[in-house]
Image (tube, coloured by chain):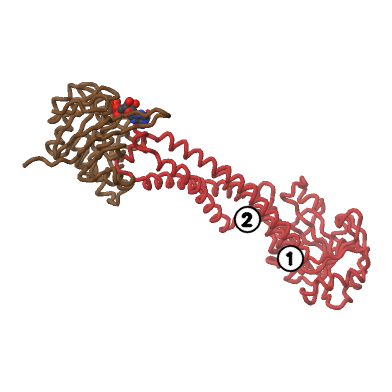
Chain colours: A red, B brown
Amino acid sequence: MIAVGVAAIIALTSLADGVFMDVKSAVAQVQGVIVFQKNPYGPLFSQIDESYIQKIERIAGVKKVHPAIIKPAREIDGKPFAYNAKSIVRLIGSKFENSQDKITVIRAEIIEGRGLKASDKGKVVIGTEVKDQYNKFVGNKIKINGKAFEIVGVYRSGSKYLNRGILLQLDDMRELINFPKNKVAQLNVELENPDEANKIAKLIQFKLGDKFKVINSTQFAKSLANILSDLRLFVLAVASLAAIVAAIGILNTMLMSVMERYREIGTLKATGWTNANIMQMILYESTFIGIIGGILGILFGTAISKLVSLQIGMPTFVSAELLSESFLFALVIGVCAGLYPAWKASRFDPVEALRAE
Amino acid sequence: MPKQSIIELKDVVKEYRLGKTIVRALRGVSLEIKRGDFAIVVGPSGSGKSTLLHMMGALDRPTSGKVFIAGKDIGLLDDWSLAMLRRKTIGFVFQTFNLVPTLNTLENVMLPLEPTGIDEIEKIKRAKELLKLVGLEHRMLHKPMELSGGERQRVAIARALINNPEIVLADEPTGNLDTKTGLQIIEAMRKLNVEEKKTFVIVTHDLSLLKYGNRHIYIRDGLIEKIR
Ligand SMILES: Nc1ncnc2c1ncn2[C@@H]1O[C@H](COP(=O)(O)OP(=O)(O)O)[C@@H](O)[C@H]1O
Ligand SMILES: [Mg+2]
């Protein structure tokens, strides 16, 4: 019973932690300011004219503007995605210029081959997750939405989500998804000084007017972090409730076991066991149940957590802290649930207990 | 040299409250058990034999009167001191054996030593010696379920002796055994009485056991009828 509670805590918390860490790192990757078109259908349908790149780059404090179109791929190597989030590969089209090792748009590094050059056409750089999933190497071809591309490099970023991506030049991207010429979906603004994000976001918003939505990604990350930590708290509360129900289960089990052993406990007292000895014995037993429950719960919880992460592609994170906390929790529940039965058993009158049938 | 008394009861009254009525299980009992006695207490069912034995075993305090065990007035002792007195001085044997079904013979015998600081090797050594003494050295790893009634009572006797007590108190030890096995158990106790110099008090309603005792205590309706 307690194992179920502990498993629930571990599975849910690790999921919340995992999502939290991944979203946080994904958002941290695109630090700076992002500009979308204000569009009644939401940022997914955002279209911005390329001419705004220069306009924004003229603003003081702006280092560079990276135009981007980010869309999920429809199919890779002829295999369509069932839209189950598990394996979605993101296509990241941007203006890649000089096969640099660092990719500013998503803060990734090239770990094999090279980056994209401005003149590259029909060439892509894939993320490590894509490489592993499709078993690709530099020099191989990869078919995206039915069209073949040559892989010239592999990148890795700090986020699993972002590693499930394919980088390609804007023109290739537009052609692939039928995006209007000279338009991009978003502008990622790189700043001279990241601390000025707030100030410059306001400045850009002012300059561009209310046709555009300017997001300060640091701030965005912060509010996201708040939502997610609330989620973690909620998950913890729900799971703790389950564990408390489990504790009542232990209490009940121990009470039953103590009642069943009424005569046995009377006999122990007759042979010279003190009330404290009896109490200690029952407490040991309930603590033992707690420990076993804790271990089973940790095993189940970690397994469920892994399964969830494999099945639905949600990242989970089982921290050492979470494991030790839930173990301690099970142990404490075991001790507490044993207190009343132990006290009760220690108070049995040996004469009555020995007379009992 | 006159034998010293090890248990002494003076005008012991024991009352139990059953709802509103008060049951007088002992109504003024005085007696003495001396070191080395093999005393047999006989009386009909409900006459107060078990209650008397519990008094002599420091399991309970008298309602009035005094009980001295090895010189200690048990009416003045708290629960902890009573437990310690039982641990050091007294071994109990019961009609229903009262073994722990999940433990094997050796573990059952060692059970009273569990709360003591004695180390495991010493515990096992002592338990093995006692099992040899009661003739059960070949049954050490059996569970109570796998033993006959007579064997179970021998395990209980070994358990009663593990703390090396001066006194062994037995409440109808032959009550759940056939006549032949019952006699073997009594003879085994008699042997321990002679060879190990333990004091025995045996409670029974079986008059045929009287011949084994050096002292006979007859009890009826909570009163001593006669002592021989
Ligand atoms: N805990 C108790 N509560 C109420 N009555 C009791 C209790 N213990 C013993 N008695 C009563 O005291 C009397 C003596 O009991 P007991 O000592 O068990 O007799 P015996 O062992 O000779 O059969 C009986 O009438 C019994 O019902
Ligand atoms: Mg009786």
Q: Is residue B107 above or below residue A315?
A: above
SS type, badge 2: loop
SS type, badge 1: helix
Tell me which residue sits at (26%, 33%) in the image: B53
Expressed as whole percent of the image width and height from the top left, the position of residue A220 reads 78, 63
Image-based side of B183 in relation to A201, left or right: left
**What's the chain of the residue with tag 1?**
A
**What's the chain of the residue with tag 2?**
A
Quick one: label 2, few (<14), some, or many (20+) residues within 10 Å? many
Which quadrant: the C terminus of chain B? top left
Q: Is residue A345 above or below residue B24?
A: below
Q: Could you give the CA–CA distance between mark 2 and mark 1, rounded to whole angstroms? A: 19 Å
Q: Which mark is residue A277?
A: none
Q: Which one is closest to the eye, mark 2 or mark 1? A: 2
Q: Is residue B137 visible?
A: no
Expressed as whole percent of the image width and height from the top left, the position of residue B82 reads 30, 44
Q: Which residue is mark 2?
A: A317
Expressed as whole percent of the image width and height from the top left, the position of residue A307 reads 63, 47
Image-based side of A247 in relation to B221, left or right: right
Image-based side of A269 in relation to A238, left or right: left
Which amino acid is tagged 1?
Answer: Gln
Quadrant of residue A169 within the rendered picture: bottom right
Q: Is residue B77 visible?
A: yes
Q: Which residue is mark 1?
A: A29
